[in-house]
Image: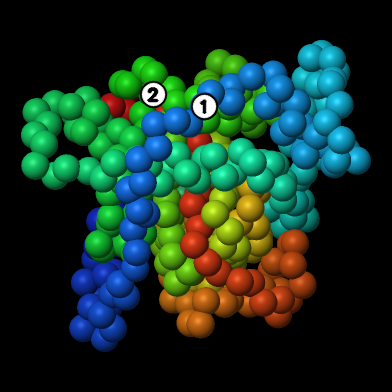
Amino acid sequence: MSAIDFRELMRLEKRRMRMQKSNSPPSKSKDLNGVNNDTVESTHSVDTIEKFSDNLLGNDGKTRPLHKDILDDQLSKVLENSQVGAEVLRDVFYIEKLLCPNFERKLTQWLKSLPTINNNERNVTSTGGIVKYHGKWKRLDFARRSVAMFDFRVVKEIPPLLQVLIDMLLRIKAFPGTHPPNHVLVNEYQDQEGIMAHTDGPMYLDRTATFSIAGGDVLFNFTKRKPDDGVDDDSNNDVMQLKLHGNGSLVVFTDDAYTNHCHSINDRIHNSVEYASCKCVNAVEGEQIQRGHRLSLTFRHKFEEAI
Ligand SMILES: O=C(O)CCC(=O)C(=O)O
Ligand SMILES: [Fe+2]
C-alpha cells in the first residue's frame, strides 16, 4: 500500500473510532472560542525576523540589528545544526524555542478568531471544496481533534502571520526556494488528544515543518513504516521519540524520516501526562511530559496536480 495521505488517515481514524466506540465513548473536548479579532497587525517585517533570530540564535536577550546578509548566513545554518537523533533516524531537525512569546500570542489569538466551517455550503468542484474549508475550523468527531486548513495554491492571499512563518522556513532552508510551503494544516488538540500513526504521503514534497504553540508538550513518535500495511501504530516499535515543546518549537522531518516512517501522537492519555521512553532523544527515560491545550501548524509543499 502506498503512503497514507490525509483522506486515508481520516478513513483509518474513522474506522478505529468506530471500533473503540463500544468500549469507551469519545471524550468531549472544547473547540477554540470564536473570538473575532480583526486587528491582527502585519508582523511581516525584517524587524520580526530579527526578533526571531535573536530568539533562535540564543543571543543575550537584547535585540540587536543584524545585517541582512549575516542574518541569512546564520539562519541558513540553524537548521542543519539542529539535527536530533542522528544515530537512529536521520533527517529530523528540532528547535525547542523558535517563536518569541509575543508572536506566539498573536498567532494563537488569530487562530482563535478563525470561523468554523459551515457544512451547508455547497462545493461543486474540488477547488470549491478547498475554498470551503480554507481558513476555517472543523471538528473531526472521529479523530479527537480540530483542524483548519490553508491551501495557497487555490486561495492566493497569505495571512501575514503565516507569511512570516513561511519566510522563516525558507530562510532557515527548511524548504527549497523552488518548492516553498503552500499548504498549512493547523491541528488543535486538548491534553488527551493526538493523531494516529501515518505518513504525510506523496501528494507533498517529502518534508514537513511543524510549529507547536499554546503550551501543551507532547511526545512525537516515529515508527518504521511496514511494507505490508504501511502503518505501525504500536508504540513498542518506536524508532525514535521526540519531545515537542508547546511554546514555539519547530520540528522538521524530511526524506527517509518522511517517506519510510510513520509519525504519531498518543491519544490514549490519562491524567494529562505521558512519560518519555528510552527512545526519546531529548528527554530522559521516564520524564513526565505535561500535556495541555496545543496548536500545531504543519507547513508542506503540495504538488499542483494534487488538487
Ligand atoms: O500535530 C502535530 O504535531 C502533527 C500533525 C500531523 O502529523 C499532520 O497534520 O499530519
Ligand atoms: Fe502528519
Between residue 208 and residue 90, name the one nearer to us. Answer: 208
Q: Residue at x 32, y 28 (%)?
A: 306
Estimate the x, y position of residue 210 in percent, counting from the top left: 56, 44
Q: Is residue 200 above or below residue 145?
A: above
Residue tagged by mark 2?
152
Residue tagged by mark 1?
41
Q: Is residue 63 above or below residue 14?
A: above
Question: For the residue carrying disc 2, how many other residues have a C-alpha within 10 Å: few (<14), some (14-19), or many (20+)?
Answer: some
Left or right position of 192 against 61: left
Amino acid beneath label 1: Glu
Comparing labels 1 and 2, the label whose residue is closer to the camera = 1
Residue 186's quadrant in the figure? Answer: top left
Estimate the x, y position of residue 141 in percent, counting from the top left: 25, 62
Task: Name the outermost residue toward the bottom.
Answer: 23
Q: Residue at x 66, y 61 (%)?
A: 243
Left or right position of 202 against 94: left
Query: Is residue 241 something that shows in the picture?
Result: yes
Q: Is residue 64 above or below residue 117?
A: above
Estimate the x, y position of residue 145 in percent, counting from the top left: 36, 59
Query: Is residue 149 something that shows in the picture?
Result: no
Q: Residue at x 51, y 82 (%)?
A: 271
- Does dot 2 land on a helix, a strand or a loop? loop
